[in-house]
Amino acid sequence: LEAEELSKEAGRIDHRGRPVLRLETPAGVSFLALVDTGFNGQLLLSDQDARALGFQVDATAVTASLAGDIIEKMNSGRGIINWMGSQRRIELIVGSQRPALRRDDDPIALIGSELLTPHLVFIDYQAKTVEIETQK
Amino acid sequence: MMRSAANNSVPELEPERCRARSEFVANEGDYWLNRLAPELEKLPDGTALVINVVNGEYVTAPTRLEAMDKFDQKFGVNTTFGFLHQIGRPIFIGGGGVV
């Protein structure tokens, strides 16, 4: 693959109208994540999913503000993903419980603006495509 | 290749106990944030810190990830409970307090 192709992430708008991307760990385990510009961290997922993907869950708590001014107490974690053509060490926000009614095709993580920065994000709802590119 | 650190995780708990642990540690963190407020107010906006909620000692770094690494270097991996905070930059999910 050309270097330009490697420094790009491509996803889609799923059948529920959500912009999703498939991310991958260095061990080759992939998972679906939702591009969420209302989340300003890097990656958010549940404790169970973080562990299943081989990420580290820390004994460090963090507070997050949810819509409606609800304050949620969560954990932090760390992990490595393949991102924009290279391996990237990232910070995780880890929730205590995965949603009870999850479908097999639901995303298990949120990608936040801190991971998207400083890239360009193209979401085409007509063509149902999502692209994240490095700025030239 | 960078090393993954899954086996450095804090012991896994049932979801309710996991939530209770986060609540407890975050409440202790809030206590220390208030108690340390006079000195934390002098830190530049964006400074990330992790407070050891057992004794109130803390480390600072430019990013949350670096602060967590520094915390491990100072206290060891998962030997105590920490509270992660970034000056002037709360974490928002779903847009935070928009509606």
Image (cartoon, rainbow, N blue to C red):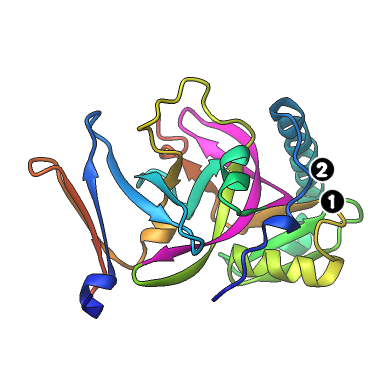
**Along the line of sight, which residue is nearer the eye, B22 or A9?**
A9
Image coordinates of residue A96 in percent, x first then y, are 64, 34
Q: Which of A61 and A97 is in front in this view?
A: A97
Where disc 1 sits, the SS reads loop
Give the overall secondary structure of the magenta segment: strand
Q: Residue at x 60, y 34 (%)?
A: A71
Residue B63, quarter of picture: bottom right
Residue drawn 81% across the image and 56% down it: B78
Please name the residue shown 63% across and 40% down the image.
A47
- Mark toward the start of the polypeptide (2 vs 1): 2
Whether residue A55 appears in this view of the structure is yes
Q: Which residue lies furthest to the front in this view?
A: A28
Q: Mark 2 lies on which chain?
A: B
The residue where tag 1 is placed is B53
- Picture coordinates of residue B91 (x, y %)? 53, 48
Q: Give the range drawn in magenta.
A: A57-83
Q: Do the residues labelled 2 and 1 touch (CB within 8 Å)?
A: yes
Q: Mark 1 lies on which chain?
A: B
Q: Distance between the residues labelled 2 and 1?
A: 6 Å
Which residue was labeled with disc 2?
A: B28
Amino acid of disc 2: Glu
- The crowding category of the residue bearing disc 2, from other C-alpha atoms within 10 Å (few below 14, some 14 to 19, many at least 20), is many
Return the residue nearer the eye: B58 or A1: A1
Badge 1: residue crowd in 10 Å (few <14, some 14–19, many ≥20): many
Name the quadrant containing residue B25. Answer: top right
Is residue A41 in the magenta section? no
